[in-house]
Image (cartoon, grey):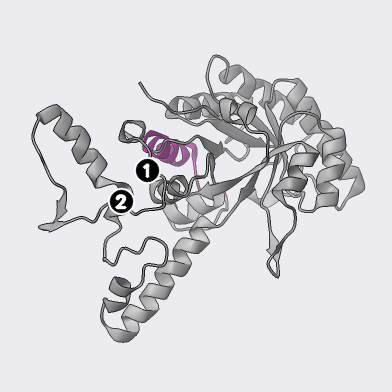
Amino acid sequence: MSSKTTLREILEQTKKCFLVPCVYDCASARAVEMCGFPVMLLSGGELSIAMNGVIDYGFTGLTDLEWMVSRISQTSSIPLIADIEDGFGGPLAVYRSAKRLALAGAAAVQLEDAGDMEETTRLLPREQYFAKIRAAVEALQRTNCLLITRTNADPDDAKEFEEGCTRVREAMALGADMAMMVKVGTYEQAAYMAERVPGWKIFADVRADNGVPSVTMEQMTDLGFKCASTHYTLKAAMEGMLQHGLANFRDQSVSYTFTHAPATGIMSYSASSMFDPQGYMELENSFTRKEKEYTIVGHKVEEFPKGFVRSKIKDRL
C-alpha cells in the first residue's frame, strides 16, 4: 500500500507557510522531491517549453497535460498540483478536464478566471467563471483532488483588485478549497487579500531583488497563507546545461562534467544515481530472490547521493 500523504493532509498538518516549486517533467519533479519539498506545482508555461518547445501561448492541450500529470504523479512520492489554465473551454470542458486530471493523479487543479492567451489580462464575467467553478467542484467530488480558484485580477487597479478578492472568496463558498491571486506580489497586496479572503491561500511566484525576497514564509504564515509557489527548476536546469555545454564545447571534451558536481559530489556523466536505480533493483531482487545489479554499458552506477531524500521505491512506481 502506498504511504503517500495527500495534499489535504499536508495543508491540515503544516502550521507554517512553505515553498512549492514549479516543475515541468519527471526529472524536475525528482529534483524537487530529493531536496525535501513536500508539494510541487506543474507549471503550464514551463511544461509548454519542455514538452513542446514553444512558449506558453495556449499551445498545450489537455492531452499533453494529462500525459505529464500521470507520469509525474506515478513516479513521485509527493503531491502534484496541476495548472489547468482556463480548463480548456466552457463548463463541460472544465468538468472533463478536472475529472481526467484527478484520475491521472493530480493532487489539486488550479482554475483561472481568464480566457485564451491573447486576452490573459481580461477577466471572464464573474458568473461565467462561477459556472466553471461549479463544474470543477462537481467533477472532483469523491476524489482526493482539491480545487484552487485563481484570479488574474490586477492588484494595481483598485477596482479590479477588489473584484478579484470577491470572486475567489465566492468561488471558495461554492466549493473551491484554496485561493490564488496570481498577480499579488508584495506583502501589502497579500495583506489586503488576506483581509478579504478567508481560508487556505497560496501566494504566487515569490520573487527576490538583490538577495532579498519580496515576502518571507514567516510573513505569509502570519497572513494565513499555506504555501507559496516559485519558478526555479527550469532556469536552474538550463543554467546548468549551458554552463556544462559552454565548457565542453570550448574544450571539445567532457572533462568539465566529470569534475564538476557542486550538489551531489558525484563525478560522472550520468544522472542515473539520482534516480535511485539501486532501489529498483532491491525491489526486483525481492521478487526474483537473486542479486541483480544496475549498470550502464557495463559500468556500475554510483550509490544514491548523500544528503538528499531517498523516498520509497514503491511510492514511485
The picture places residue 21, in percent across and down from the top left corner, at 56, 48
- Asked if the magenta segment contains residue 63, the reply would be yes
Amino acid, disc 2:
Phe
Instruction: Decide whether the magenta segment is chiefly helix, strand or loop.
Output: helix
Q: Is residue 155 visible?
A: no
- Asked if the magenta segment contains residue 55, the reply would be no
The C terminus lies in quadrant = top left
Q: Which mark is residue 43?
A: none
Residues in magenta, as a range: 58-75
Q: Which mark is residue 304?
A: 2
Mark 1 or mark 2, which has the lower sequence index?
Answer: 2
- In the picture as drawn, the residue positioned furthest to the bottom comes out as 251
The picture places residue 116, in percent across and down from the top left corner, at 64, 45
Q: Residues within 10 Å of mark 2 (few under 14, many from 20)?
A: some
Residue at the image position 55 percent from the left and 37 percent from the top: 81
Disc 1 designates what residue? 310
